[in-house]
Image: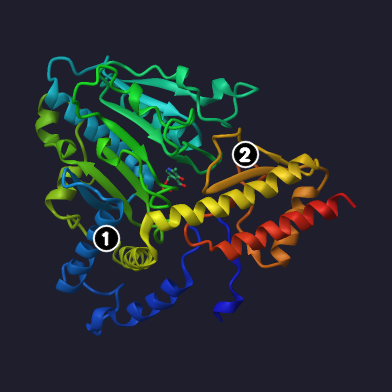
């Protein structure tokens, strides 16, 4: 029964809203009165194509995506986009600058955690043959106490953007390390949009953002200035299996024309233009994941969209960080991320003392709370507070954290 469900604070795949899960059971048996289940119906049926168009319209309306940008759906997760962004943006660059494009073409990466680091590594792999070079425009580790931990957004003085890169890449929220750019206008830990184009002349910036773990948790600042924003669905908006892309029209390029000029060839499935030309139906999409995502988005819209979630998520994060800070003052917890760089979505901290982490996890499990173990690469505790986590559920873990701290001090 649904009341036996544990509270899932896992980082991904993550909790989905209970009403959506209940509703999707109907669709599994009978999608839109067709008598056919959603996992069985043709992706080219009028019912599904209409549903997909509605999912797109829903994202466009809630995030106020302008007509300059296409919204596309694909598979392969964020990891496939680590490669796709390089291939498509290099093809674009080749078509814009056929003479200049080559081994010296910079790909600027802002490295603030494990995922942007991984994306930069993929770019390095793809350009081993000399099609471009990766330039790390800022590395957050250089600004940590030990020089090797991702625990802060770099100071503004750290950024060294290239003059005319083929792409500028950042990860808005680092899921593993719990580091996120601030959305407060003028905050020192906000993304330095103003440093990207010092001349101020109108320019189509090649700005790429990985929003996998913060998509639709709040409005996206300066969305229209991005070349591409992408996100796997499996944290805030749906099950794993579908990746959402928001791509500016000038980045939907003829990759074969670019390859003829010497750019890296692009597999059909990785070409954004192919996706756009086929309305995201070049091949069979992840129909079931798109369906559940569509239901989540409908529910989000009814509740008030990203503005509603911004308020809710702010409250949840403030409460949980207050409990972490309190535990830190009492010597039981240790917050991992510096002030001003804390993620709203993934709260990471350590539980200090012999066997204490296990006691924390076991106690949480006894109380019906799971998914709290930190990523295997960093250890510790990670509390993920994605959209589906309610304020009451956040209160429940806060209550437990406060109890745990008191208990450890006995
Ligand atoms: N980017 C971020 C910020 C992530 O959190 C993840 C996965 O957790 C990825 C990329 C990789 O995504 P996927 O597992 O969908 O390939």
62 vs 341, left or right, is: left
Label 1 vs 2, first from the N-terminus = 1
C-beta proximity under 8 Å, tags 1 and 2: no
Q: Ligand 1 sits in which quadrant?
A: top left
Quadrant of the frame with the N terminus: bottom right
Return the mark for residue 58: 1
The residue positioned 25% from the left and 56% from the top of the image is 61
Q: Can residue 356 be seen in this view?
A: yes
Q: Where is residue 58 in the image (x, y as percent from the top left)?
A: 27, 60
The residue positioned 50% from the left and 25% from the top of the image is 154
Number of marks present in the image shown: 2
Query: Vertically, is 66 above or below 312?
Result: above
409 vs 136, left or right, is: right
Query: Vertically, is 179 above or below 303?
Result: above
Q: Position of residue 35 (x, y in %)?
A: 25, 85
Provide the residue designation for mark 2. Answer: 378
Q: Give the crowd class for mark 2: few <14, some 14-19, many >=20 residues within 10 Å.
A: some
Closer to us: 163 or 240: 163
Q: Can residue 12 be seen in this view?
A: no
Q: What SS does tag 2 mark?
A: loop
Viewer-nearest of discs 1 and 2: 1
The residue positioned 78% from the left and 42% from the top of the image is 352
Q: Where is residue 46 in the image (x, y as percent from the top left)?
A: 14, 72
136 vs 392, left or right, is: left
* Rendering quarter of residue 238: bottom left
Q: Give the crowd class for mark 1: few <14, some 14-19, many >=20 residues within 10 Å.
A: some
Q: Position of residue 390 (x, y in %)?
A: 54, 63
């Amino acid at each position: 029964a649904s009341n036996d469900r544990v509270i899932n604070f896992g980082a991904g795949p993550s909790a989905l809203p209970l009403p959506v899960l209940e509703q999707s059971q109907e669709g599994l048996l009978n999608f839109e009165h067709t008598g056919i289940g959603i996992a069985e119906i043709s992706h080219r049926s009028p019912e599904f194509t209409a549903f997909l168009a509605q999912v797109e319209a829903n994202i466009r309306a809630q995030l106020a995506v302008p007509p300059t940008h296409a919204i596309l759906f694909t598979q392969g997760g964020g990891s496939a986009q680590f490669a796709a962004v390089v291939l498509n943006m290099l093809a674009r660059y080749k078509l814009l600058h056929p003479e200049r494009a080559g081994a010296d073409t910079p790909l600027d990466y802002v490295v603030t955690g494990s995922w942007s680091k991984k994306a930069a590594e993929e770019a390095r792999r793809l350009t081993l043959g000399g099609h471009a070079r990766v330039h790390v425009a800022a590395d957050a580790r250089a600004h940590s106490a030990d020089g090797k931990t991702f625990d802060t957004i770099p100071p503004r003085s750290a950024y060294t953007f290239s003059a005319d890169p083929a792409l500028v890449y950042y990860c808005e929220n680092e899921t593993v390390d719990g580091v996120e750019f601030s959305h407060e206008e003028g905050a020192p830990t906000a993304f330095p949009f103003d440093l990207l184009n010092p001349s101020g002349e109108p320019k189509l910036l090649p700005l790429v953002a990985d929003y996998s773990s913060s998509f639709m948790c709040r409005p996206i600042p300066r969305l229209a200035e991005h070349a591409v924003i992408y996100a796997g669905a499996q944290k805030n908006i749906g099950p794993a299996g579908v990746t959402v892309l928001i791509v500016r029209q000038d980045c939907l390029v003829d990759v074969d024309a670019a390859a003829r000029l010497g750019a890296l060839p692009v597999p059909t499935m990785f070409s954004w233009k192919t996706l756009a030309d086929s309305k995201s139906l070049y091949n069979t999409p992840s129909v079931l994941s798109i369906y559940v995502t569509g239901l989540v988005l409908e529910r989000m819209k009814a509740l008030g969209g990203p503005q509603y979630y911004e308020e809710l998520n702010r409250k949840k994060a403030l409460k949980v960080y207050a409990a972490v800070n309190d535990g830190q003052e009492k010597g039981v917890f240790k917050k991992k991320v510096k002030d001003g760089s804390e993620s709203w979505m993934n709260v990471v901290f350590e539980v200090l003392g012999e066997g204490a982490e296990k006691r924390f996890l076991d106690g949480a499990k006894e109380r019906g709370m799971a998914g709290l173990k930190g990523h295997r690469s960093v250890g510790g505790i990670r509390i993920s507070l994605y959209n589906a986590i309610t304020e009451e559920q956040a209160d429940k873990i806060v209550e437990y954290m406060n109890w745990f701290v008191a208990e450890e001090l006995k």
